[in-house]
Image (cartoon, helix red, strand yellow):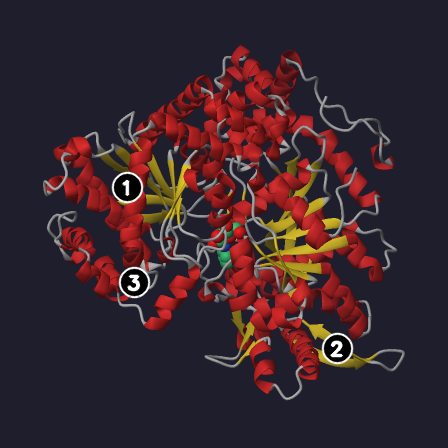
Amino acid sequence: RVGPTLPVSSELAAGPVEPPASTVEGFIEAFLRELNYGQGVLLSRSTINDQYLALARTVREYLMAGWLETGALRREGDRKIVGYLSAEYLLGRQLGNALLATNLQDIAEEAMRRCGIDIAALRAQEIEPGLGNGGLGRLAACFVDSLATMDVPCIGYGIRYEYGIFRQTFENGRQVEVPDSWLALGSPWEFPHPERQVRVDFGGHTEKWTDDQGRERTRWVPGWNVLGIPYHHMVPGFRNGTVNTLRLWSAKATQAFDLQIFNSGDYATAVRAQTFAENISKVLYPEDSTPQGKELRLQQQYFFVACSLHDFIANTLPKDFDLRQLPERIIFQLNDTHPVIAIPELMRILVDIKGFDWDEAWDITRRCFAYTCHTLLPEALEVWSVELLGRLLPRHLEIIYQINELFLEEVRQAFPGDEMRARRMSIIAEHPERSVRMAYLATIGSAKVNGVAELQSQLLRDKVLPDFSEYEPAKFTNVTNGVTPRRFIYLANRRLSNLITDTIGSEWVTDLDRLRELEPYADDAGFRAEFAAVKQANKERLFRLLSVRDGLELPQHAMLDVLVKRLHEYKRQTLKLLHIVSLYEDVISGTVAIDQVVPRTFIFGAKAAPGYHLAKEIIFLINSVAATINADERVKGVLSVAFPANYNVTLAEKIIPAADLSEQISLAGKEASGTGNMKFALNGALTIGTDDGANVEIRQLVGDDNFFLFGMTEPEVEALHARGYNPAEYYESNDKLQRTINLIASGHFTDGDRALSAQVVDNLVTQDPFMVLADFQSYLDAQARVDAAYRDPERWTRSAILNVARSGFFSSDRSMRDYLDRIWLSSPVE
Ligand code: OAK
């Protein structure tokens, strides 16, 4: 039986909540009940979707007792709770994870078989909730998984976007975005609670008033408002009975909002007004790391943050709770700057509504927040124009001004006469327009600030927030990212999981350092053979999928060389493309005989932000190169390029376990951490990578012999910038690079149309902001080392095993322990 057996709460006085029996018969009974009474159909008349929904609801039943009891424990206990505030949760499919958490996989499979149903078809029916863009959103999903598995009380707060990240399709090689209607067939994983609606105000103005004690106070007279409806999701721990909650907010129009207009007889306007309000949670902004400063985006941010703070204070804390104790009961972790408006919001609640003095409120507030910065790109640092912020949230802008004024006074006291410093540290930027720097507000208003890998945390201190780290060095810390081994090994790579468990037992699933015990087996030829067989089987599984899904036919025995992540110039998909074209050019020019080439299949996966023009040109070029190379008999079976559309969590779970080579080739100093890099290493791919983000830590752990390092270091990049970088020099002086670029520029891959590759080529040769050309030769040299290593399969497999054995550090369970020790300063609940 899953779930704690303690009758912990009088709320459960009606009797213990009994899940169905964990037997095939018990499961079938519950499933048929859900099908008949939940879905309202007979098995013989049911569609695949009926069956999927009934199956999901059946698994839910097994989690319910644990969920209710965990919730009761949280409310009744006095433990500190983590309030994870994130605008994105890239969850991936839920069914497999719920079956895994409840240990019902085999029972469910057999139960479905007896009902004449192929469970694989039901799994495939699920549309993943893509409520995130990439790394930041997937990290949030890994973190809530780990917290539940570690019994840490956590509420994840976010937005229930009606449309998540767009579905990517290709038309003539160009990206076309299709709306992602993940809710179209109903989501069995969410529990709407319209009765727990929260009102959120916007606009209007502020007024001064005097209270009974003669104190001057401020009140916000809002101009309009919307309702937030919470949708609860279960976050099950791995077989520990804990089920935490993810609370996602959906916007709904208030009645008052449209009644006024309705009464004036203008029905159409009233309906439009309703649509306007409900737009707030309509769609996820698809820009990854490049904020657009759109009004609706700020509305989204304030909307979910206001709902969440209200929910915690009014509904989770006891009614008579003394708010001076708030920092003992909650830590709000800010997932980048998107939720940072929570800081002035808590000040508003404490000062304007609860009547606290400013200083006391500020002391409380600063201890309730911690800020994680996920970037190093200057263009990714959010700023909001004062004009917009003041129009949408006039009271919050006043509060931000006051926070700033008091903070700068402190700075001036600490550094008398250093007015330049005070100006640099101001939350308000004056150029190019008056705006609020959200990262500064986050830093000033938080107890701790962290980066997501050692190198980035260092650069954050030295380059992004140097004045702040000088002023309050103890505030800054690092927590290197991690990934959940439940989804990314156990679920995604059952074959490897079984091999590991057969070899060292099953403890590794919740104690990933145990993978170290695999190290001696790297020298065991029998184990290597089994390990290699797992890899081969995973490749074949992937190829079957890509054949059905994308009509791609790929050779069975080539090295699988994979670059999957968002499309961004700094991630340098073009460098990979240059490598592929140079190999191809070697063959077609007769420089290298085809039988000298190590067979490789290259896989790309990448979505571009819809407005990111150059990124979309790069996608087109990759597809053009792929089509040309795949159709060229001269390289058939030796060089193949696959770019399946719509890379997402579901596809990642198939691609990563099959990969031989993991491409982590960002320009040093640009990738904050990366988490794909960790997933590949844990699944036995070797990395070719720069000294960037968490690659640095991966290399330190797996060892130089098991990692292909190339490219400039961050200080070298800086030095080259300072000297003045001119990509044309590299083009002129490197014959191979010239031939490669010339072949692309010639129109060879674009049916002779030179214009179709010109933008990418010109950008590389004349601008190359991420120094692709400067790292080209070093990359090619490293790829030659990759080829040499791959020619020796025993050596390769040995390295792959050592990558797995030495990457236990990259479990998100470890990240959570680090957050607990360094930031949240509390230990998991017993
Ligand atoms: C998105 C929006 C604004 C700022 C950063 C991001 C983002 O996704 N950053 C990514 O976060 C991941 C998780 O920490 C890191 O692994 C990636 O390196 C980083 O680009």
Tag 2 residue: 218
Q: Secondary structure at mark 2?
A: strand
Label 1 packing within 10 angstroms: few (<14), some (14-19), many (20+): some
* Mark 3, residue position: 768
User: Where residue 208 appears, x then y in whole percent?
Assistant: 75, 81
- Report the side of 121 relative to 361 (left or right): left
Q: Residue at x 14, y 39 (%)?
A: 592
Front one among 195 and 673? 673
The earlier-in-sequence mark between 2 and 3 is 2
Q: CA distance from mark 2 to mark 3?
A: 52 Å
Residue 276: give x, y in percent of width and height: 53, 60
Question: Which residue reaches farthest bottom?
Answer: 417
Separation of residues labelled 1 and 3 (CA atoms): 24 Å
Q: CA distance from mark 2 to mark 1?
A: 68 Å
Quadrant of image for the N terminus: top right
Vertical order, 370 against 577 (above or below): below
Check disc 1 and report its element: helix, strand or loop: helix
Tag 1: amino acid = Ala
Q: Earlier in the sequence, mark 2 or mark 1?
A: 2
Mark 2 closeness class: few <14, some 14–19, many ≥20 residues within 10 Å: some
Q: Is residue 200 above or below residue 813?
A: below
Q: Residues within 10 Å of mark 3 (few under 14, many from 20)?
A: many
Q: Is mark 3 within 8 Å of ligand 1?
A: no
Q: Nearer the viewer, residue 72 or 456?
A: 456
Task: Provide the residue designation for mark 1.
Answer: 784
Which mark is nearer the camera, 2 or 1?
A: 1
